[in-house]
Amino acid sequence: MELHVFILMVAVHVSTEVNVVHHDYQFDGCSDTEKEDMYGFDGEELYHSDFQKQKGVVTSPDFADPVSFPGFYEQGLSAMEACKQNLANHIKAYKNPPEEMGKPETTIYAKYDVQRGVENALICHVTQVFPPPVKVSWSKNNVKVTDGVDLSQYRKNKDDTFNIFSTLRFTPQEGDIYSCTVNHKALDYPLTKTWEVNIALPSVGPAVFCGVGLSLGLLGVAAGTFFLIKGNNCN
């Protein structure tokens, strides 16, 4: 039994010098194991309910004039109850037909420039997921890692699939190898992407060339001065 999805899209016309269309949306999803309640505006998330921490989370930055009101989280709980009822009714009405599935694709990259001993974050971006859920796990040098791992909310793509981000906080050390493994029922076997710490040393080329150039320049000045003096002595 997978995520049952309810999406509300509202187009708002704002009268200025030109007509601008904005999209306000609500995403509710539920299954036997998963719950998600999120609000967004023009493709950006404004708010979601964190059902593990039992609180509402405002995700828009301060400069965007974030919106919240008492009862946001309680409203999310009510939405999940309605979602479960709708899910049961849909399964009964449509006799639980086979679902179309999308095979996840993954990309792994560092959030910041990598420097030895400086804390950073690895991001595993999983996209083309359908239907949720998808499981994401991390390992370091073939040892499973759970500390410092965060998982984002599901984000809906334009093609009705989903994407999700898993983040691992880490401190780079030369030669360490990290792996992000994705499990989904559309995959024949787990999908794993690896990332190796490779800290490039500063290039010594420019400094060497500058030093050699300066030395040759000084040598040229000295030689010119020597011949000038010799010429004067001859006169």
Image (cartoon, rainbow, N blue to C red):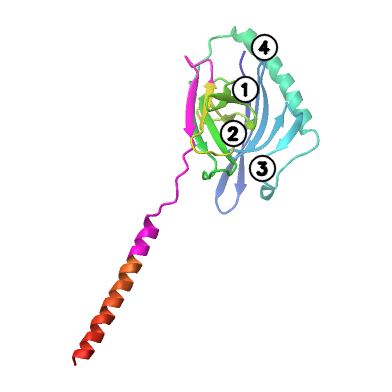
Disc 3 marks which amino acid? Ser
Q: Which image quarter holds the N terminus?
A: top right
Q: Which of marks 1 and 4 is in front?
A: 1
User: 123 or 177: which is nearer to us?
Assistant: 177
Q: Name the residue under label 3.
A: 60
Residue 182 within the magenta-colored segment of the rendering: no
CB-based contact (under 8 Å), mark 1 and mark 4:
no
Residue 12 on image: x %, y %:
62, 41
Disc 2 marks which amino acid? Thr
Left or right of 63? Residue 233 is left
Residue 57 visible to the viewer = yes
SS at mark 4 in the image:
helix
Residue 195 within the magenta-colored segment of the rendering: yes
User: 117 or 33: which is nearer to us?
Assistant: 117
Disc 1 marks which amino acid? Val
Q: Name the residue under label 2.
A: 167
Distance from label 2 to label 4 (Cα)? Answer: 36 Å
Q: Name the residue under label 4.
A: 89
Q: Which segment did they paint magenta?
A: 183-212
- The residue drawn where x is 44% and y is 51% is 202
- State which tag comes first along the sequence, 4 or 3: 3
| 229 vs 153: above or below | below
CB-based contact (under 8 Å), mark 2 and mark 3:
no
SS at mark 2 in the image:
strand
SS at mark 1 in the image:
strand
